[in-house]
Image: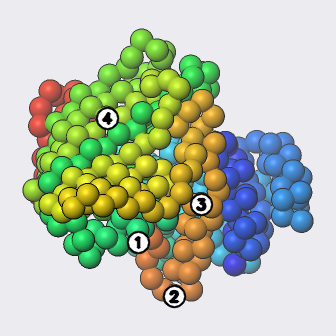
Amino acid sequence: MNAVLVGLGMVAETHLRAVAGAGINLAGVMAQSATKAKAFAEAAADTLGYMPRVYVSADEIVADAGVDFVILCTPPNARLELVKTFAGAGKHILMEKPIERDAVAAEAIVEICEVQGVTLGVVLQHRMREASQQLAKLLNEDAFGAVALAEISVPWWRDQSYYNEPGRGTYARDGGGVLISQAIHTLDLALSLLGPVATVTASAHTTALHAMESEDFVQASLVFASGAIGSVTCSTASFPGRAETITLHCAKASAILETGRLIVHWRDGKVQKLGTENATGGGADPMAFTHDWHQAILTDFIAALHEGRAPVAPGREALNVQQLIDAMILSSRNDSTISLSKDR
């Protein structure tokens, strides 16, 4: 399989290591700046053992019949035209989260890929952690009984320098702040474990710790379609930053998912510990996490192409978390409870 990496921001190095680890051929790279792309390609040779080609345009990529898929890492406001070009040429797309800045724009991208018959996968790599998969298995086996309460917490930290980058934390480029850029991973994982949310009541704010357009702190109350209730607290103002957690209180046990570790407190007093703790990028260094989860997403995406199945986080399923984020922001702006029913 031959891939091209499009968009060479801070996460590009993680994808480079994932590509190398998965044994995929990185046919080339592309960035808004050809100079930046050339420098990245030259440096990538140390990791790959060869220098990938530098493409200067999307049209040049689609003209290369040897390219099987594109890893799209541009900011979300720079996606639509690229997706039209790549999908129209039959190039599959593995895309960094979020799909777009809001759920309506994201759905338009999903529909383009569906109409063109190309596979769209989204990099929601927290699903690939060993502990996340162990928790999903236990829930699917109904080991804990019914989930009554879910506590979702993302107490991260970003220094002001992070938001000083042009466009960072703006609605025009990113689509918002902590929800769509950071907490989206934990919220997506929660939805994959617990199913859809029926209603949400939220309050979003910008603290005095950041000068930015969008929110750096959100609290919300959720009611899941299953009947479980949940609380959400998300922040990039929580110095020095701590690991995100999903805690489930169930009929037979309580389970705490913290980065790569799962701790289960059974009602009979037994405590079970699974997985290993990992860094998550929740502190001052947003890239302080392993590339293993990206590599797992990439490996699954390639297997999905070979097997003719959906990847672990397909585009249409990834719309769920974007719809939830939109609802949380709308709830805060309108000071109201928002329904996420399908007929909404």
In the rendered structure, are the residues bearing label 3 and label 1 in contact, judged by CB atoms less than 8 Å apart? no
* Lower position in the chain sequence, tag 2 or tag 1: 1
Q: What element carries label 4?
A: strand
How crowded pointer 1 is (Cα within 10 Å; few <14, some 14-19, many 20+) is rated as some
- The residue drawn where x is 48% and y is 17% is 210
The answer to which of 285 and 336 lies nearer the viewer is: 285
Tag 1: amino acid:
Glu
Residue 158 screen position, x and y as percent: 54, 27
Kindly identify which residue carries mark 1. Answer: 114
In the rendered structure, are the residues bearing label 1 and label 4 in contact, judged by CB atoms less than 8 Å apart? no
Mark sitting on residue 307? 2
Q: In the figure, is residue 200 to the left or right of 306?
A: left
* Lower position in the chain sequence, tag 3 or tag 4: 4
Task: Measure how far apart labels 2 and 1 are at the Cα level.
Answer: 17 Å
* Lower position in the chain sequence, tag 3 or tag 2: 3
Q: Can residue 297 be seen in this view?
A: yes
Kindly identify which residue carries mark 4. Answer: 233
Q: What element carries label 3?
A: helix
How crowded pointer 4 is (Cα within 10 Å; few <14, some 14-19, many 20+) is rated as some
Residue 273 screen position, x and y as percent: 42, 59
